[in-house]
Amino acid sequence: MEIIDPAPQLDAPHHASLVAIGDSFTEGMSDLLPDGGYRGWADVLAERLAGRTPGFRYANLAVRGKLIGQIVEEQVAPAAALGADVITLVGGLNDTLRPKCDMGRVRGLLEQAVETLAPACKQLVLMRSPGREGPVLERFRPRMEELFQHVEDLAARHGAAVVDLYGARALGDQRLWDVDRLHLTAEGHRRVAEAVWQTLGYGAEDDWRAVLPAAVPPPWLARRVADARFARRHLAPWIGRRLTGRSSGDGRTGAHVDPVTGRAFWVTPADATAPGPVQGWRRVEPDAV
């Protein structure tokens, strides 16, 4: 089959900077790197944007476990101050998974965040988060869909773009979710990056909505063993944190937040002359740009 090199887009978008804020979904769990860190969809997206734009800058302020109130208090103002071309905001889903959730408060805080961020960037990106198939989703589905409808309403009022991951059947496939059943695999994160890439106006590189090939379900006993392992390693600690008021993000800062000063900073490709994928990032202070 002949491979045709696509002609350059004459009206291709141009984004020279990206800031990502939110919780574990944006931090990148569970797209684990060999050094113990996480990559995630935001990092994948940043690498792709950097390949098109010399001098590209990126900051990921997201921290696992954060509720929407914490995102507003800790991440929104620093993100707005960076003055990025694109800001992505994904938050509120952790709130909907709490036994006691004031959806009116969640909606108000999300609106506060959008009102601050939309004027501070060229393009604000919101999301309807993906939902894994299973009984947990069914229990919390009404809250989630109320949140996602509010996301749509806010986007319409403030000119934000919405990436509808929730409506993509492929992302509900359990094979795209880690063993903790809360976070996407590397392939899941790659698909989210492609979805945001296309939403920003770039040409599709693949079909992120493509359904995975059918697979033979594992035997009943194997499923029960997996359920027991999940309950012991992931569900019990999660419930314990809820009961004691702790969070997996306690004491953590975003990847691009200085833990000493609390200031957000940019990173840019370490070698701007190297062709191909970004091999590493170096820190750049905002006031030095």
Image: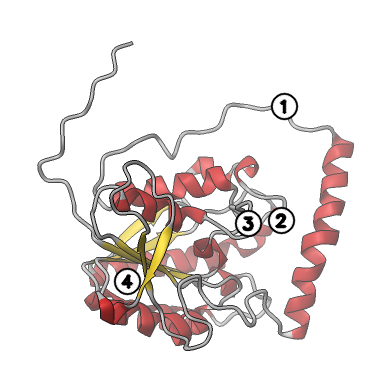
Density class for disc 1 (Cα within 10 Å; few <14, some 14-19, many ≥20) is few
Q: Are marks 3 and 4 in contact (CB under 8 Å)?
A: no
The local secondary structure at tag 1 comes to loop
The answer to which image quadrant residue 117 occupies is bottom left
How many marks overall? 4
Amino acid type at mark 4: Leu
Spatial distance from mark 3 to mark 4, Cα to Cα?
38 Å
Amino acid type at mark 3: Asp
Label 3 or label 2, whichever comes before in sequence order: 3
The local secondary structure at tag 3 comes to loop
Task: Identify residue for label 3.
Answer: 35
Rendered location of residue 227, percent (x, y): 82, 50
Mark number displayed over residue 180:
2
Left or right: 202 in relation to 226:
left
Label 1 or label 4, whichever comes before in sequence order: 4
Residue extending farthest to the left is: 10
Q: Are marks 3 and 1 in contact (CB under 8 Å)?
A: no
Amino acid type at mark 2: Asp
Task: Identify residue for label 1.
Answer: 216
The residue under the point 68% across, 76% down is 99
